[in-house]
Image (cartoon, grey):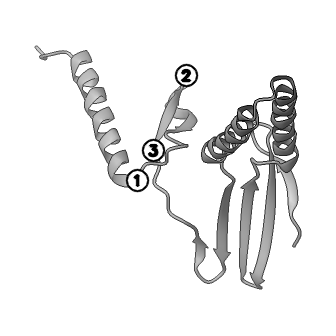
Amino acid sequence: MEERRYRSASGAPIALRPRQHSASCRELAVRCPRLQLRSLSAVTSAVWLAAYGLFVLSENSMVLSAAIFITLIGLIIYLHFVKIDQESLLVIGSLGIQQKVIYYLCILLQDPGDPQGVSDVVPLFQSSKPRLDCLIEVYKSCQEILEQRKTASQPSGIK
C-alpha cells in the first residue's frame, strides 16, 4: 500500500504508511519528518554565502572556518532536538494489537459541567519520555500533595 499524507493536530505534515504483511497482519506506521533537505540547504547556503562575502571583504580565512564550524554545530543541535519521529501499530488477527510499550503519565481534567466527567486528557513529559520508575516517583509525589490538600479541606471532627 502506498503512503498517504495527512496533517497532525498542530498542522504539521505527517505520513501514514500501511503495510500488509499477510491477510491477517497489517502494520500502520505514522511518521513526522522534521528535517527537510530544502530548508537545510537554504540555511547552509545563506551562512556560507555570508561567510564568503565577509572573507572577500576581510581576507581572513578564519571567517570560512567559523562558517563551517557554525554550520556543523547548528546541524548537530538541530538533529539532536528535532528528531524524525515514527510510531507504528502492528495488528495481528490471531493475537490482537502489538506495539512498543511506553509508560506515560496523564492528567485527567475535570469537566466543569459534569463533576464525574473528564473534559481532557493531558499527557506529561512527552519529549523526555521517562521510564516507569521515574513516573512512579512523580505519581507518588503528586498523590502526596493532593492527599494533603484533601485532608486539609475536610472537617477535623464530626460532632
The picture places residue 3, in percent across and down from the top left corner, at: 86, 64
Which element is circle 3 on?
loop
The three-letter code of the residue at mark 2 reads: Pro
Q: Quadrant of residue 126?
A: top right
Disc 3 from disc 1: Cα separation: 10 Å
The three-letter code of the residue at mark 3 reads: Leu
Q: Is residue 68 left or right of residue 128?
A: right
The picture places residue 139, in percent across and down from the top left corner, at: 34, 40
Which element is circle 1 on?
loop
- Residue under numbered circle 1: 131
Contact (Cβ within 8 Å) of mark 3 with mark 2 = no
Q: Relative to 29, does residue 113 appear above or below in the rendering? A: above
The three-letter code of the residue at mark 1 reads: Arg
- Residue under numbered circle 2: 112
Which one is in front, 57 or 46?
A: 57
The picture places residue 43, in percent across and down from the top left corner, at: 82, 37
Q: Residue at x 32, y 52 (%)?
A: 133
Q: Residue furthest front?
A: 59
Marks 2, 1: nearer the viewer: 1
- Precedes in sequence: disc 2 or disc 1: 2
- Residue under numbered circle 3: 105
Q: Residue at x 86, y 23 (%)?
A: 57
